[in-house]
Image (spheres, helix red, strand yellow):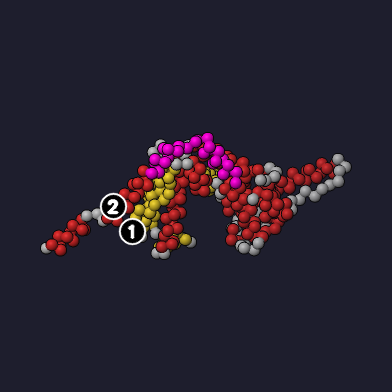
Amino acid sequence: MNQLSEQFNQQNQPSVLAQSSSSREMEEVKGQIFMARQFPRNIYQSEQRILDNCKRPELAQAAVYSYPRGGTKVEGPSIRLAEVLAQNWGNLAFGVKELEQRPGESVAMAYAWDLETNVRQEKVFTVPHTRKAKGSIKKLDDPRDIYELVANNGARRLRACILGIIPGDIVDKAVDECNRTMQGGNKGPIKDRIAQMLQVFKEKYGVTQEQIEERVGYSTSAFTEYDLVEIGKIYTSLKDGMSKVDDWFDKNSKKESTGGLADAFKDEQKSENKKDDESDKPATNEKVSVDEFELSFEESE
């Protein structure tokens, strides 16, 4: 009876390890709050640090996400930009925690906590251990695949939590600064560079404007610097032989696109050449070369 009583007491009492772990976490949180109150952020310095980071071309290229929806383009700050905002805003705790892993699913939480103002954003979500590929659903049993799946799903919730803490005007300034960074590394109007890109793809690989628009999901008239960089990566992959045209573009798309921007660009160049001939000036060949497009893409990087 004494042994049974002792075993019962041990099962109903919290373990010493759990108590020490809980106490340690509580003391860490208290320490973070104390340091945040002792050294409050300087909003102007934090804003300047964020804008300085947005001047890096590598960050600017990955700062904005976009995807087609209902014939229009949806844009917003990416998780990479959200992480930079949180790191330079200061006194902000953020992350993703896996709370529980059940058979076939995981329960996780994304959070962002302003230690100065005690404003907290958190989102608890469930991630099924499945992945859809080629029209079929595959169950995951590899721990690494499960971890990556939870991390990818948590990144989107983490971005929403961080953007719920950082003031909206700071986020808008950061996005504008990233756009200026990408535009500053390129020469010439974006309309002309889009036309050069379309002409090079058509002449070298037989890819039409309609195929490119189908790949991206919207018209070339809505292209931004980010879209030019993404199409430039495809061009580099094709040029280096790392992929084929069929890997990126649909064969069943129409071969010719009416009212294309590249054709309009050609007509505009022909009219300029004609004016030069009438004014007794030596005619110049204004045809866009592959080298010009490559140089434009290299400068954008």
Magenta stretch holds residue 127: no
Q: Which residue is located at x 60 percent, y 57 percent? A: 249
Q: Amino acid at mark 1?
A: Arg
Q: Nearer the viewer, residue 8 or 209?
A: 8
Q: Which residue is located at x 54 percent, y 41 percent? A: 50
- Residue 97 appears at what percent x and percent y? 39, 52
Split into 4 quadrants, where in the image is the N terminus? bottom left
The residue tagged 2 is 19
Q: Nearer the viewer, residue 58 or 124?
A: 58
- Residue 176 appears at what percent x and percent y? 57, 39
Q: 263 above or below 204?
A: above
- Residue 196 appears at what percent x and percent y? 70, 49
- Residue 138 appears at what percent x and percent y? 42, 63
Magenta stretch holds residue 49: yes
Helix, strand or loop at mark 1 = strand
Tell me, for residue 102, which label it has, or none: 1
Q: Residues within 10 Å of mark 2 (few under 14, many from 20)?
A: few
Q: Nearer the viewer, residue 33 or 46?
A: 33
Q: Which residue is located at x 65 percent, y 62 percent? A: 240
Question: Marks 1 and 2: which is nearer the front?
Answer: 2
Find out whether the residues at labels 1 and 2 contact each other: C-beta distance under 8 Å.
no
Horizontal side of residue 70 vs 26, given as left or right: right
Specify start and end residues of the magenta stretch as a single range: 31-56
Horizontal side of residue 226 vs 151, given as left or right: right
Q: Main secondary structure of the magenta part?
A: helix
Q: Amino acid at mark 2?
A: Gln
Q: 104 above or below 166?
A: below
Looking at the rendering, which quadrant does residue 241 occupy? Answer: bottom right
Helix, strand or loop at mark 2 = helix
Which residue, as the protein is rendered here, is positioned at the far left?
1
